[in-house]
């Protein structure tokens, strides 16, 4: 009995002791240390960081890649304590630079600067990217020596790649770290200062779709902004994939043909020819889909990826980017004088409005009868011509007379139907709307004679190669104008179609049947008639082509060269506009259009027998 009482007393004593210990601890936590824990809780805060998945891919109409994302290795700094960074950085930089002392110095300088900025702004909680694009050899060496670099880790990131290099780069664009200007713009609201974003082309226009939805990491940080722990993490959603209307085979042919044409022009050693840059646009007549958009010069967007990873030398920059012709500008979207290619619109306006009869002829003399200071491009009297042959031979006096009778404002009012003087609505940034001159637009400079220059596509007229392609397609459609576009489909990362583009009619051009007939006939004769300005290029082509050439005087020592054309003549499918600044003679750039037609229709073609100088 006594033994049992003793055991009970011992058990009760143990319980009392345990309760006493717990109570003492609770008292210490709730009374003695409560102020300290409250202070620590108040002084810690949560900071949210975005994380990004792979950027969406860009494909041509047949699924061939133009821009992709691939995994690369990167070194990331998590502990940004300045003393710690200063201790490990010399050896770490040398390792990441592959032993190159100069590059190691650049890495060190960059990291120290970023650490100072983060410390000043209370952003030590952010992961600091030291260097990306690391080779497998460097990664293997880092892993062997990882114990020397606490607070640093190798991670896998997504990096942009452009498999075609220069191919269609003026359309696709490129990516770079976000600029301060972009950060402050509404279009980039919510973006992180270290984000990589589109800078031009499709990459910029469809930035939000390609970027995807960022993930979310919530970190607990102390008052100095140093990370204490991770509270929450949500995975990002990858960007959407885009399928373009471009056909890579046609795009490549367009680029090759344009470059070949410019090289040929240079080889003529013509004092009037100083080719600087060129652009070629091909459009599906029945939909407005852009099939090709080429230019010379162009650039390789992979160079900008290299600039973000291993760096770009000054020599590489000067050889590829800082070159004559400004390759970073999409010249298909910039305005130039269209020259005589403008004459179809002027002729349609004159005949349809009734200011000139459908069969009325005008004397195409060496000079214009009303104003002897206005000459024809051709040095011999071409006789009296109606609209069709005036187009075929590019008779300036016919269109001077039409412009004179219409007046500049009535002419402008009619030509707005082609979309001149306003953006086409193409899904690309930085489109120049061009200039459709009126008396008001000339202002104090206005003189009645300005209408003569405008009527032959010069003076203040500004039209982009893209607008010329749309204009040509609209004529081929007998007045139905489609809005041009580049993105055909948008797909999720799982392949689901979330958006599909349908053709959009942007407007109509009103014209009489006879005006359309003569315009068609004029363009067809321009490509086939013995006196047609483009006949030496297209007369033997197996597919019937309708074409118009033009050369525009710019006030410089050279003229610009332009050709527009569509085919087949009896069932138009494709329209092409070719422009070469400083190309001198309009028909000199027509062979590039012929090459595109041959590719489109699957014809083996050696091209025309050159040479000819025609407007």
Image: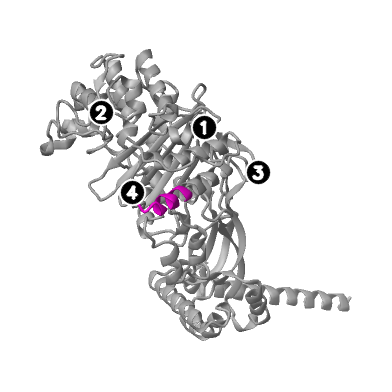
Indicate which label's residue lies in the foreground, 4 or 1.
Answer: 1
Q: Position of residue 250 (x, y in %)?
A: 55, 41
Q: Which residues are magenta?
A: 260-270
Question: In this picture, is 610 found above or below 362?
Answer: below
Q: Return the residue at label 1.
A: 540
Q: State which quarter of the image contains the C terminus.
A: top left
Residue farthest along the front direction in this orientation: 380
Q: Return the residue at label 3.
A: 494
Magenta residue check for 431: no
SS assignment at label 3? loop
SS assignment at label 4? loop
User: In the figure, residue 409 lies in which quadrant?
Assistant: top left
C-beta proximity under 8 Å, tags 3 and 2: no
529 or 517: which is nearer to us? 529
Question: In this picture, is 106 found above or below 596?
Answer: below
Q: Position of residue 559 (x, y in %)?
A: 30, 45
Q: Return the residue at label 4.
A: 582
């Amino acid at each position: 009995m006594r033994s049992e009482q003793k055991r009970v007393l011992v058990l009760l004593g143990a319980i009392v002791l345990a309760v006493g210990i717990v109570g003492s601890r609770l008292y210490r936590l709730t009374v003695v240390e409560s102020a300290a824990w409250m202070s620590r809780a108040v002084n810690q805060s949560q900071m949210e960081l975005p994380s990004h998945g792979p950027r969406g891919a860009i494909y041509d109409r047949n699924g061939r890649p133009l821009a992709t994302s691939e995994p690369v290795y990167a070194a990331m700094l998590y502990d940004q304590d300045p003393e710690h960074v200063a201790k490990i950085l010399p050896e770490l930089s040398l390792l990441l630079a592959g032993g190159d002392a100069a590059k190691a110095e650049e890495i060190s300088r960059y990291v120290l600067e970023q650490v100072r900025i983060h410390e000043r702004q209370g952003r030590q909680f952010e992961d600091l990217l030291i260097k990306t694009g690391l080779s497998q050899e460097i990664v293997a060496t880092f892993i062997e020596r990882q114990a020397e670099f606490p607070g640093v880790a190798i991670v896998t990131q997504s990096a942009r790649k452009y498999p075609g290099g220069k191919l269609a780069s003026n359309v696709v664009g490129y990516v770079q770290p976000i600029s301060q200007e972009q950060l402050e713009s509404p279009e980039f609201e919510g973006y992180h200062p270290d984000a990589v974003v589109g800078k031009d082309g499709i990459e910029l226009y469809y930035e939000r779709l390609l970027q995807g939805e960022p993930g979310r990491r919530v970190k607990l940080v102390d008052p100095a902004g140093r990370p204490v722990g991770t509270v929450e993490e949500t995975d990002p959603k990858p960007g959407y994939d885009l399928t373009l209307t471009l056909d890579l085979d046609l795009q490549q042919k367009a680029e090759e043909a344009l470059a070949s044409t410019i090289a040929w022009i240079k080889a003529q050693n013509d004092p009037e020819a100083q080719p600087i840059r060129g652009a070629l646009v091909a459009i599906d007549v029945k939909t407005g889909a852009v099939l090709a958009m080429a230019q010379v010069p162009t650039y390789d967007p992979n160079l900008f990826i290299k600039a973000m990873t291993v760096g770009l030398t000054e020599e590489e920059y000067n050889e590829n980017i800082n070159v004559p012709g400004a390759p970073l500008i999409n010249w298909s979207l910039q305005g130039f004088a269209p020259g005589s290619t403008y004459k179809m619109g002027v002729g349609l306006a004159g005949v349809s409005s009734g200011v000139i009869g459908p069969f009325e002829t005008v004397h195409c003399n060496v000079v214009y009868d009303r104003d002897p200071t206005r000459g024809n491009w051709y040095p011999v009297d071409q006789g009296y011509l109606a609209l069709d042959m005036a187009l075929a031979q590019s008779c300036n006096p016919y269109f001077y007379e039409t412009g004179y009778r219409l007046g500049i404002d009535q002419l402008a009012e009619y030509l707005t139907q082609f979309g001149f003087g306003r953006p086409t609505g193409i899904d690309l940034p930085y489109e120049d709307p061009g200039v459709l001159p009126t008396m008001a637009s000339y202002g104090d400079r206005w003189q009645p004679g300005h209408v003569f220059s405008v009527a032959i596509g010069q003076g203040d007229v500004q039209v982009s190669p893209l607008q010329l392609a749309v204009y040509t397609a609209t004529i081929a459609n007998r007045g139905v104008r489609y809005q041009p576009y580049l993105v055909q489909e948008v797909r999720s990362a799982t392949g689901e179609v979330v958006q599909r583009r349908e053709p959009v009619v942007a407007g109509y051009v009103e014209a009489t049947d006879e005006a359309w007939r003569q315009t068609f006939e004029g363009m067809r004769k321009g490509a086939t008639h013995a006196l047609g300005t483009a006949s030496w290029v297209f007369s033997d082509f197996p597919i019937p082509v309708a074409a118009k050439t033009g050369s525009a005087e710019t006030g410089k020592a050279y003229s610009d060269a332009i050709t527009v054309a569509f085919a087949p003549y009896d069932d138009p499918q494709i329209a092409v506009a070719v422009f070469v600044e400083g190309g001198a003679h309009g028909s000199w750039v027509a062979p590039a259009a012929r090459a595109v037609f041959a590719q489109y229709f699957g014809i083996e073609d050696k091209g025309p027998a050159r040479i000819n100088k025609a407007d």
